[in-house]
Image (spheres, grey):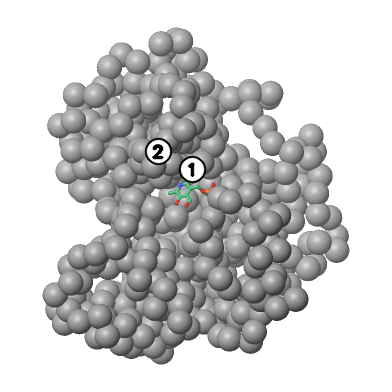
Amino acid sequence: MTKKEFIAASEKVFMNTYKRVPVVFVEGKNCTLVDSEGNKYLDMVGGLAASGMGHSPDFLVDAIQSQAAKLMHVTNYYWNEPQYDLAMLLVDNSFADKVFFCNSGAEANEAAIKLARKYGYKHFGESRYEIITVSESFHGRTLGTLSATANENYREGYKPLPGGFKQVPFNDAEALEKSITENTCAIMFEPLQGEGGLTPASTQFVEKVKELAEKHQLLIILDEIQCGFGRTGTMFAYEQFDLKPDIMSLAKTMAGGFPIGAIVATDKVAEAWKPGDHGTTFGGNPLACAAGVATVKEIIKQNIPEKAQKDGEYLKEKLDGLVEKYPFVNKTKGKGFMIGLELDFPGNEVVERAFEKGLIINCTSGNILRFVPPMVITREEIDHFIQILDSIFSDMK
Ligand SMILES: Cc1ncc(COP(=O)(O)O)c(C=O)c1O
């Protein structure tokens, strides 16, 4: 089959949920993807921030191959070693005492929502169920996480959605304070928003979250699915605030591109669950966890948080140069290896032109080019990326 025939055949068999670029990737190494016709691309999307340590790094291939040959799956009726090892890595490197594994980001947020509700129910009774989330947030595509997600585009046609959520404008401390009622059990947000356009939480907002949480005995849920595991310059983004969450959701980079999700929480909150309160068949299976152990160990060994901070600063300086050079490039957003460029116009055309020049980028919130590359990207690759963007902008003048 030619590429065209393959795509036509695929269009016939797949539900029409994705607007896909007409390319078939067959191989990847570090920051490079190779398509079915042998063309190479510099990847600044990194599997949507999931291939955090690059495509098929040797350490991950080895870990998956050897675990696959030993034991791929047992259910959570039994203990398994890779699950323990990954849990210990998460506990030792975060605020948390306890871990629950699942298979994706949305599933992690479902678990976070359920744990917060159960905690509210146990400590304060049935009326304590409401979770405050923020504008431009993205927490996933299940019905529960869609209710938590503010973006109306994702919700249209799926109503009625589960109740028990209230949205306030992001970083509006006053609105947050006003939204609290005797029904509120938790406040949930991303420390640095991903899909919503790379907007960070402000210190003032975080201070208000802490004050209200303490005053009203509310839980703080942080969604670090996209910004966790070093991407913003620290192992977890919350470390850059004077903030200790009660629950944190994780996924994406945790197993380097192998599907996995988790929530971590303090003992005090986690004890709201007893056997039977929540569960999953595949969550925490030995294969996914072995991939997670290998990935998190490598993130620590290579000091990826420091690399993201330093090379992220280098990347930002270069992007700032484009902001100065082109009047239609408004500003950079985000930090580390979770960074974007706000344009005066929709970013689709830039994404398409970049693709033609062998560069994979993505656009979010209409006019924000988002760059979440594998964090092993080299400075030479950053320079090459900037050169391509520069040439595209220069043609658009
Ligand atoms: C912050 C955040 N939360 C949740 C999700 C949902 O994760 P998943 O697509 O693995 O369900 C995403 C995915 O992009 C995300 O960026």
Q: Quadrant of the C terminus?
A: bottom left
**Foreground: 84 or 136?**
136
Element assignment for label 2: loop
Contact check, label 1 and label 2, Cβ < 8 Å: yes
Q: Is residue 371 above or below residue 157?
A: below
Residue 107 image position (x, y, % from top left): 57, 40
Can residue 313 be seen from the camera position used here?
Answer: yes
Bin the neighbour count of mark 1 within 10 Å (Cα to Cα): few under 14, some 14-19, many 20 and up: many
Q: Is residue 179 above or below residue 299?
A: above
Three-letter code, disc 2: Thr
> Which dot marks residue 83?
none
Residue 315 image position (x, y, % from top left): 31, 77
Q: Residue at x 67, y 32 (%)?
A: 279
> Which dot marks residue 140?
1
Q: Quadrant of the N terminus?
A: bottom right
Position of 3 with respect to 157 (left or right) is: right
Position of 228 with respect to 50 (left or right) is: left
Q: Quadrant of residue 71?
A: bottom right
Between the residue at mark 1 and the residue at mark 2, the CA separation in whole angstroms equals 7 Å
Residue 252 image position (x, y, % from top left): 53, 56
Q: Is residue 216 above or below residue 314?
A: above
Q: Residue at x 15, y 32 (%)?
A: 174
**Foreground: 194 or 39?**
39
Cβ(mark 1) to ligand 1 < 8 Å? yes
Residue that mark 2 sits on: 149
Position of 3 with respect to 298 (left or right) is: right
Q: Residue at x 34, y 73 (%)?
A: 350
Residue 144 image position (x, y, % from top left): 50, 31
Three-letter code, disc 1: Gly
Element assignment for label 1: loop
**Foreground: 59 or 321?**
321
